[in-house]
Each structure stands twice: as structure tokens, then as C-alpha cells.
Amino acid sequence: MNEALSREEAKRLFERHSKSIFGILLALTKSKVLADDLTQETFIRAFCKYDQYRGEEGSDSAFRPWLARIAVNLARSHYRKLKWQTLFGQVPDQATERTAEAIALLNERQLELWQAVCRLPHKSREVILLHYYADIPLKEAAETLDIPLGTCKSRLAAGLAKLRVSPDLLDYGVPGYVKSKEELR
């Protein structure tokens, strides 16, 4: 562990942020096992590089986006490695498990929305997950993803536009959502 971080502070930070980081990674990977592994790796890296953290000491609002950035980068790295393994014919076994949607969301409408979000393009999904599910402001989400704020906003708008016309959400009856397929024409 880093000398700039006490054991008690590390424990407090883990207890405070591990659920949200796990949620982000679960949404990105759709695997509880992989999300758990990447959550642990996120905190290991964060604690080892804590002296490089530029936020105010004790400021959880700045620490969470820093952690989220580490988590997103780890997930991206994992999938890059997976693509290389696929090219070389070494695809690791993937355990079958209950879907993250079925475990995380009990309400049927939330489940439908969650499934629609998971079908969005990866770039839009990342922004929506960080902003709505992890409750990270757009400016911090843009910093987390290392993209300009305008790009972050356009990815959010594109993702929301696709959700509004998603056939799975047509019966939502929520203002702003299309209520019937005829309205799409």
C-alpha cells in the first residue's frame, strides 16, 4: 500500500466506493465474476498510485471519478486483451451465470430499461452508466472517459435518443418515450 494512504483511510474509501465501482464494471462487463475481479484491481491500482491522486484529501466527490476512470480503463484493457486472445485462438472459458439485469433489477420496467441500455453502442452506454447509474456529473464523466465535454454530451444525447425509440420501451408511457410504433413513422 502507498505511504500517503493509511490503512483506515483505504478501508473507508473501499467501503464507500466499492459498490458503485462494482456497479459500473458489472454494467460494462455483464459478468459478476469479472466485475468483482476488476473492482479489486481498481482499488489495488488506486491505492498503489494514491500519491498521484490530485484531489483534495478526504474529498470523496473528486475521488469517485478518479476511481471510475481507473475502472473504465481496466475494463477497456480487458476487452482489448480478449480481442487479441481471440485473434490467436485462445478464448478463455466464460462461466455462465445469471444475467446482471436479472440480479440487479427487480422491477420489470427497470429491467426493460436496463436491457435497452445494455444494447446501446458501447460509447453511449458508458456515458449513460456513469451519468445516470453511477450518478457522476457529465463534466466528471467526460474526464473519466478522457473525452471532451461536448463529445460526452453528444454521446449521452445519442444514447437517450435511441432509448426513446427502442421497441422494448414503447409501452413505457413515460413522457418523451414513443408510445407506439406508428409514432415512429
Image (cartoon, helix red, strand yellow):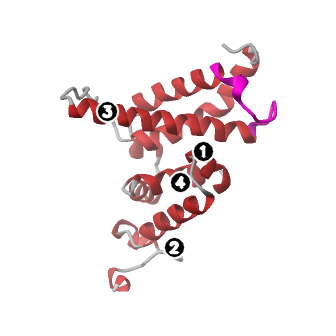
On the image, the x and y values in percent for residue 98 come to 34, 37
Q: Quadrant of residue 144?
A: top right
Percent x, y of residue 2: 69, 15
Is residue 58 found inside the magenta-colored segment of the image?
Answer: yes
Q: Which residue is mark 2?
A: 174
Q: Nearer the viewer, residue 28 or 149?
A: 149
Q: Which mark is residue 127?
A: 4
Which numbered disc flags the more N-terminal residue, 2 or 1?
1
Kind of residue sitting beneath label 1 = Thr
Residue count near mark 1 (Cα–Cα under 10 Å), binned few <14, some 14–19, many ≥20: many
Residue that carries the numbered disc 1 in the rendered image: 144
Q: Secondary structure at mark 4?
A: helix
Mark nearer the N terminus (1 vs 3): 3
Q: Which residues are magenta?
A: 48-60
- Report crowding for label 4: few under 14, some 14 to 19, many 20 or more residues within 10 A (C-alpha): many
Mark in front: 2 vs 1: 1
Of labels 3 and 2, earlier in sequence is: 3
* Residue count near mark 3 (Cα–Cα under 10 Å), binned few <14, some 14–19, many ≥20: some
- Residue in the image at 45% along x and 54% along y: 123
Residue bearing mark 3: 82
Closer to the camera in the image, 178 or 67: 67
Q: Position of residue 59 (x, y in %)?
A: 79, 36
Q: Is residue 11 above or below residue 98?
A: above
The secondary structure making up most of the magenta span is loop
